[in-house]
Image: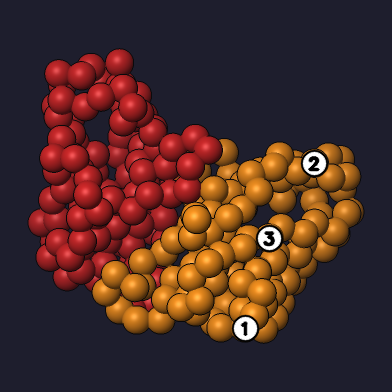
Amino acid sequence: ETGVTQTPRHLVMGMTNKKSLKCEQHLGHNAMYWYKQSAKKPLELMFVYSLEERVENNSVPSRFSPECPNSSHLFLHLHTLQPEDSALYLCASSQDRTRPYTQYFGPGTRLTVL
Amino acid sequence: QKEVEQDPGPLSVPEGAIVSLNCTYSNSAFQYFMWYRQYSRKGPELLMYTYSSGNKEDGRFTAQVDKSSKYISLFIRDSQPSDSATYLCAMSEDYGGSQGNLIFGKGTKLSVKP
């Protein structure tokens, strides 16, 4: 497996469910990112991890909780989501934060909140 | 005023046409300028990046940056149906930390008709 992988690719959940999104990068990168992509909106940066330490949280509601157990894996834990949270959630990694042009994206998880 | 403006299209052209995609921005501190291509149900993939002003060519693709006008362009020569995708511009400042975060346009949806 190469590049950045994400599972599951599709997820439907109710507002009271708890689920997790998983991301894995096979590139030896040191920084990982979660983005939200909604229709007719630019990609929104949610969280940034550098060397497994969260370095940025862009005013994301607490119903989204990230976890980075090591430099290759990133999770996004979801609970009590709202219908407006339905979107494509993209994971990305880069060599480090000083080289943003090295960001590689995964295929995304299409999330639908009922 | 939004940081990065990009016409969402859709843009439809015949096969073989020259395509011009562009973005404008307001932050004069941006130094890195990226173009991503995103096929349906896939994550964005980096096409090209440019540092500061100037042109960069890669096969049928040419990226141009005009910092004096705060305007960037991507040209696609001899367009092919396989070029049909959404094209995202992204920019960042030249430092590590938050300034290195990518700021995206909304993307332009391109369709190349055979």
Residue lying furthest front:
B1
What SS does tag 2 mark? strand
Q: How is the protein colored in the picture?
A: by chain
Residue at 21% over, 27% down? A81
Q: Give me the C-alpha separation between circle 2 and circle 3.
A: 15 Å
Q: Earlier in the sequence, mark 3 or mark 1?
A: 3
Q: Give me the C-alpha separation between circle 3 and circle 1.
A: 15 Å
Horizontal and vertical percent position of residue A72: 22, 60
Same-chain status of marks 2 and 1: yes
Rendered-image quadrant of the C terminus of chain B? top right
Horizontal and vertical percent position of residue B110: 71, 45
Residue at 85% over, 59% down? B18
- Apparent colour of chain A: red
Q: Are marks 2 and 1 in contact (CB under 8 Å)?
A: no
Label 1 marks a residue whose chain is B
- Apparent colour of chain B: orange
What SS does tag 3 mark? strand
Q: Give me the C-alpha separation between circle 2 and circle 1.
A: 29 Å
The amino acid marked with disc number 3 is Asn
User: Is A71 located above or below residue B13 in the figure?
Assistant: below
The amino acid marked with disc number 1 is Ser
Residue at 69% over, 66% down? B73
Name the disc covering residue A82, or none. none
Local crowd size for mark 3, using a 10 Å CA cut-off: few (<14), some (14–19), many (≥20): many
The answer to whether residue A68 is visible is yes
What SS does tag 1 mark? loop
In this view, the mark in front (2 or 3): 3
Name the disc covering residue B12, or none. 2
Residue at mark 3: B22
Q: Residue A49 vs residue B107: left or right?
A: left
Return the residue nearer the eye: A57 or A21.
A57
